Amino acid sequence: MNKSLLITGGAGFIGSNFVHYWLNKYPEDTITVLDALTYAGNLANLESAQSNPNFNFVKGNICDQELVENLLIEKTINTIVHFAAESHVDRSITGPDAFIKTNIIGTYTLLKAAKKIWIDNPKSEGKSPFEHRFHHVSTDEVYGTLNADDPAFTENTAYAPNSPYSASKASSDHLVRAYHHTYGLNVTTSNCSNNYGPFHFPEKLIPLVIINILNNKALPIYGDGKQIRDWLYVEDHAYGIDLVLKKGKAGETYNIGGNNEWANIDIVKTICGMVDQAFKENKELAIQFPKALSAISDNSESLISYVKDRPGHDRRYAIDATKSQKEIGYKPVESFDSGIKKTINWYLNNTQWWLSILDGSYQDWVKQQYKY
């Protein structure tokens, strides 16, 4: 049966990459994107999808239950992939209200709409309940933090969120679980590690470092820079969700990781070296990016600047994806070396995308957050 998907937050970083992945792999399926186009939502992320007759974009908020119900009916939606969320720990520290509204109330609203249309009033040619799937995209941050020698997070790790962001995501995870066990909604949840790749909003570590090198600006590193994260190329994340939708069991949670732990400072130094190498190999880059004086002189690491650590900064995240490997056959395709090269090249070749975001207000926000 062909799928008719509702992708919430599909104009954001991970959501838009998932849209492109799905349209390319399953051209007979239809996709409706619902996105409020807040600061991280960007229609430019979906530009190449706009001409596809099986793609439809709706500007709207996941907290609008009537809108969601109408979309489920009008588009005959049988699959929801729920990406929409306020993200970024720093933003949750300075403005937690939006995280409570979107991540908790928004998810609750989607669940209510799905239950009403798919279970309470199914339109399924005599089948009850309607054949459906609600897939919820979460994060490894709900598990808290790890010491250097602790085993990686599994699906059985107790939740211990340490920021308003991760607490709001943990709350939404519990609501999704409850709607399966209480009402029989067919749900799955995936908890992923740090994503990177095309369309990554410039406030995040990897794109911030790349773009700041190209503008010869400081590369702000929190504390000692030895916080460890597991990094996942965004298309591998889309592939993992695909497998969960195909093979995952309703009510189950699946960790999707990159098997790729790096300290933040090592990530930054690796990007510096790769950008410097790119400038060595392609002299045209010096003309294209004349401000990148440190990269032109093969010395991007000189831009590294250590700043005060943020409150409650988790020391280490690490994903154990053994369950996903055994039960649904998940394994990341990209190594970090291949994925980060693709990412750097994408930012070098898509300057208009990130220049349109750096309109002054964002730059002021970054300077305020990182104090440089």
Image (cartoon, helix red, strand yellow):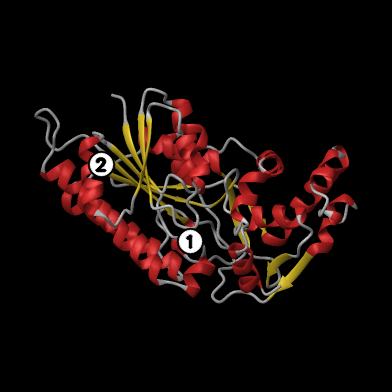
Residue 354, percent from left and from top: 63, 49
Can residue 247 be seen here? The reply is: no
The reply, left or right, for residue 8 in relation to residue 345 is left
Residue depicted at 46% across the width and 55% down the height:
139
Closest to the observer, 69 or 82: 69
Q: Residues within 10 Å of mark 1 (few under 14, many from 20)?
A: many
Using the rendered view, name the quadrant where residue 33 is placed. top left
Point out which mark residue 317 bears: none
Q: Which residue in the structure is indicated by mark 2?
A: 71
Tally of numbered tags: 2
> In which quadrant is the N terminus drawn?
top left
Which numbered disc, 1 or 2, marks the residue that appears first in the sequence?
A: 2
Residue depicted at 45% across the width and 41% down the height:
324
Point out which mark residue 141 bears: 1
The reply, left or right, for residue 87 in relation to residue 134 is right
Helix or strand or loop: what does disc 2 sit on?
Answer: helix
Labelled pair 1, 2 in contact (Cβ < 8 Å): no
Closest to the observer, 319 or 73: 73
Residue 9, percent from left and from top: 41, 49
Using the rendered view, name the quadrant where residue 372 is placed. bottom right
Cα separation between marks 1 and 2: 31 Å
Q: Amino acid at mark 1?
A: Glu
